[in-house]
Each structure stands twice: as structure tokens, then as C-alpha cells.
Amino acid sequence: MSGEFRVRELVLGIEGLALLRNAVDGDEAFLRERVADIRRFVLDDSGEEKLPDGGAAVSELGAAEGYAAWSAVYDSLPSSYIEVEEPVVGRILDGLAPGVALDAACGTGRQTRALAARGHRVIGVDQSPHMLEKAREHTPTAEFRVGHLERLPLDDDSVDLAVCSLALTHLAELDPAVAELARVVRPGGRIVVTDMHPFVIALQGQCLFVRGSDELAFVRNHVHLPSRYLDAFGRAGLRVRGCQEPLFNGRLAPGGYEEFIADAARAAWDGLPIVVVWDVEVPDGRGAR
């Protein structure tokens, strides 16, 4: 599937969101600047359209193909999502005793490194061999296996802890992956799930990256409301200990179109949660399966 990276629509959408969020009690000068920007971006001095319709081609890739293409640059890209997620996850992990830990959809092994540094024996699972190569370079002491979230290559009740970071959004349905995480974690164990916040996905849509030298691509993000996570956890017999929603920290993607309209972009996202972090446990009383 392919689409278009429409600069005009994206720029005007961010300006409009900034206006919408500040329309009632926003600073008058700020509001005038947003309206002036919209006029300036749409029309030139002669009244003709300034930003053309249409844009660059964008390809939608499956998770395996997409992350294979993304793996070469993934670790070098600054991310506001990761910056606000990691301290929250770190505080949860700091309270857990070392054991056998699963990094599910481990990618290049960001959480594998964090788990290993805390004394866990780590098993990283990902469907992309390219990502696993990078992860193995970073943490050679960990064990890595090719596998899918919906079919984890682990035995029942085989780990004390599972971490799954920024991955479930790529699945159309939560239940199969949540059930698998519940299956492999022992009674009394913990599951930490993080994801892009549904607010961000609903408003922003897809996260683009450059494939190869100049081709734009994305791996689809699906909107999963908190109620859907709660339903999936409940059906898997899990108990929610906590849910945290870290807020936008002001970082814009370097070199992206939002830096061109930084004031509007920061106002559009200010105060909104951009990540959700779930701390879930497997009840001790879960029966044998």
C-alpha cells in the first residue's frame, strides 16, 4: 500500500490543532501568529496557492520488512517517545529482583540492555533478523530468538518478567499478543507494556522514516484505547498494578516539518501524553494450564 507525504496538509493540520487547543484562553498574539502562518503557507503575495497539493510517495511496509529497513538507522534517531518512556520503565524495573526476563519485540535491544544491566538473564525475541543482529552486537550475553508476538518461542511459565516496548501498536488486535505474554510469565511475575499513546496516533497518524536513500515509509500504527488494553489484560487473567502516561517533553523530530513550525507544533502537543506504560502482574493463584 502506498500514499503521499502531504506537506501542506500536515503543516496546516498542526497549525489548526494549535489554534483549536488555545482558542478559548490562548494568548491573542499567539493566535494571530497562527492565523498569519496559515495565510502565509497557503497563499503567496499574489493570492495564488503557495504550498502545492500532493507530495512525496510513502510506502506502507509490514513490520518485518519495515523494521529490517529501519534497523540501519533506528538507534541513531532521537525520539521523544523513548526519552519519556525510559525513566518510567526504569523505575519499575529497579523495583524487581533479577531473574529470567523476556524482551518481546526487542528490536535493536534497547530494553535488553536495560534488563541485562540490572542482572537479568535476558531472552530477546523479534521477527526481524536484522534487528536481532543489532541487538546481539549490543548485548552479546543475551539469548536471541526469531519469533512473533502472537507466537512467542518460549515455554509456558518460563520467565519471571516480560517487557514489550512500543510494539503492540503495530498489531490490529491486542488479545493474541497479551495472551502470549501471560502464557510465558510465571505466576507472580510481571509484565511491562509500553506503547505510543492512542491520542498521538489518532491525531498524528503514522511515523515516517527514510528507507534507503530517499524513500519514505511507515509501519502502520493502530489506535488501541486504554479500555482495549484493560479488556485484553482481563481476558488473559492479568492484574493491572499501574498505568502511567508520560507527557510530551518538547522535543521535535530533528529535520522534520514540525521544526519549520516549532511554536505551533509545541503548542499542539503541549500537555498531551505521548506514551502509555502498563505495569501488570500474573496472579500467584493462576492455575496450571
Image (tube, rainbow, N blue to C red):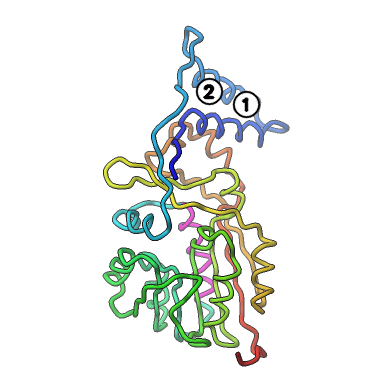
At a point 56% along the width and 20% down the height, the residue shown is 36
Residues packed near mark 1 inside 10 Å, few (<14), some (14 to 19) or many (20 plus): some
Q: Is residue 226 above or below residue 238?
A: above
At a point 30% along the width and 40% down the height, the residue shown is 214
Tell me how far mark 2 sits from mark 1, CA to CA. Answer: 10 Å
Mark 2 or 1: in front is 2
Front one among 211 and 176: 176
The local secondary structure at tag 1 comes to: helix
Residue furthest toward the right? 24
Q: Is residue 164 magenta?
A: no
Residue 94 position, x and y percent, is 50, 76
> Which of pointers 2 and 1 lies earlier in the amino acid sequence?
1
For the residues bearing labels 2 and 1, Cβ distance under 8 angstroms: no
Question: Which residue bears the numbered disc 1?
Answer: 31
Q: Amino acid at mark 2?
A: Asp
At a point 50% along the width and 64% down the height, the residue shown is 87
Q: Amino acid at mark 1?
A: Leu
The local secondary structure at tag 2 comes to: helix
For the N terminus, the quadrant is: top left
Chief SS of the magenta region: helix
Residue furthest toward the top? 46
For the C terminus, the quadrant is: bottom right
Q: Is residue 82 magenta?
A: yes
Question: Which residue bears the numbered disc 2?
Answer: 37
Residue 200 position, x and y percent, is 57, 48
Where does the magenta region start and end? 80-93
Residue 195 position, x and y percent, is 54, 60
At a point 35% along the width and 76% down the height, the residue shown is 144
